[in-house]
Image (spheres, rainbow, N blue to C red):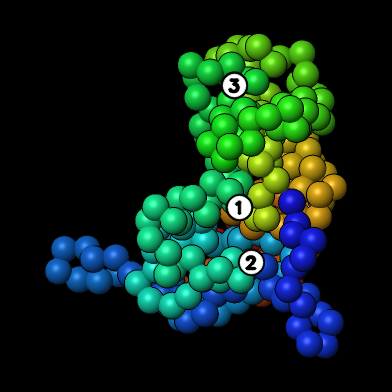
């Protein structure tokens, strides 16, 4: 997942995979404007697993939508692997996301009329990668998530945990540079959620990938390399102990 040719600074240090420069997002509500993100400046390094915390409505999902190019900022820049996605057209943002970003949601978003194999093949077909190598990648991922025997099953025949593991495999099948996840365990019970998250982290780390995950889960926070919090519309680094208190609902 990680680009082996990641650009390096002159001192040999790796450059950030994701950069926010003076990022602002505001919405018009009636005759007034509500600013959700205000002059955000931050970066995420290649290979990092970063968790994003904040109260409901603070802008967590908004930030993921901006990084993925689903939405555009009011002002500022978002650089992903050296590409300023804020300068791309809507079509080019869609193509960039399709090729370089993996998305995992709380509600699995599998296509109900496609079986498991077809759900995983779809991103490859959209990227022109549905060849023998792509099919082998699907097989490998199904084995990695422990669901090789469900390749011909339809989503409604799978448990919630199984559906989310398939959603994870689909998000990773095209080997994206960046994995974005919005409450990936929020629709699962505690034990199943932990197992699914362990699978996600293991697969992404195995490939040297980078993750930005929105969550309220203490278990997910414990797995993170770094925790960012949204406070007053901006991003701040949180100590792990403070982040765990937030995840427990103290201060959210």
> Residue 100 bears which disc, if any?
1
Q: Is residue 174 visible?
A: yes
Q: SS of the residue at dot 3? A: helix
Tell which of 174 and 201 is nearer to you: 174
Q: Position of residue 240 (x, y in %)?
A: 76, 66
Q: SS of the residue at dot 1? A: helix
In the shown orientation, is residue 156 left or right of residue 69?
right
Pointer 2 residue: 81
Q: Quadrant of residue 54?
A: bottom right
Label 2 packing within 10 angstroms: few (<14), some (14-19), many (20+): many
**Total numbered labels:** 3
Q: Are marks 2 and 1 in contact (CB under 8 Å)?
A: yes
Q: Quadrant of residue 177?
A: bottom right
Give me the residue at 42% from left, 64% from top: 88
Q: Position of residue 163 (x, y in %)?
A: 63, 25
Label 1 packing within 10 angstroms: few (<14), some (14-19), many (20+): some
Label 3 packing within 10 angstroms: few (<14), some (14-19), many (20+): some
The quarter of the rendered structure image containing the C terminus is: bottom right
Tell which of 146 and 115 is nearer to you: 115
> Residue 118 bears which disc, if any?
3
In the shown orientation, is residue 53 left or right of residue 144?
left
- Determine the CA span between mark 3 and mark 1: 20 Å
Q: Are marks 2 and 3 in contact (CB under 8 Å)?
A: no
Q: Earlier in the sequence, mark 2 or mark 1?
A: 2
Q: Earlier in the sequence, mark 3 or mark 1?
A: 1
Give me the residue at 59% from left, 21% from top: 118
Q: SS of the residue at dot 2? A: loop
- Determine the CA span between mark 2 and mark 1: 9 Å
């Amino acid at each position: 997942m990680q680009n082996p040719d990641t650009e390096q600074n002159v001192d040999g240090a790796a450059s950030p995979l994701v950069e926010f420069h003076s990022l602002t997002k505001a919405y018009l509500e009636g005759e007034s404007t509500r600013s959700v993100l205000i002059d955000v400046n931050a970066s995420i390094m290649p290979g990092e697993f970063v968790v994003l915390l904040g109260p409901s409505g603070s802008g967590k999902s908004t930030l993921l939508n901006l990084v993925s190019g689903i939405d555009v900022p009011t002002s500022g820049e978002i650089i992903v692997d050296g590409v300023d996605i804020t300068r791309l057209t809507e079509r080019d943002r869609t193509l960039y996301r399709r090729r370089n970003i993996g998305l995992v949601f709380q509600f699995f978003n599998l296509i109900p009329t496609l079986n498991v194999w077809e759900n995983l093949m779809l991103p490859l077909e959209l990227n022109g990668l549905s060849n023998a190598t792509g099919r082998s990648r699907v097989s490998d991922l199904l084995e990695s998530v422990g669901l090789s025997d469900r390749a011909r099953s339809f989503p409604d025949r799978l448990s919630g945990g199984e559906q989310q593991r398939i959603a994870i495999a689909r998000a990773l099948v095209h080997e994206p540079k960046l994995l974005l996840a919005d409450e990936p365990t929020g629709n699962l019970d505690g034990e199943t959620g932990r197992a699914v998250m362990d699978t996600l982290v293991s697969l992404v780390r195995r490939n040297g990938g980078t993750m930005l995950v929105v969550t309220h889960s203490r278990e997910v926070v414990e797995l993170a390399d770094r925790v960012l919090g949204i406070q007053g519309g901006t991003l701040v680094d949180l100590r792990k102990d403070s982040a765990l208190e937030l995840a427990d609902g103290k201060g959210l």
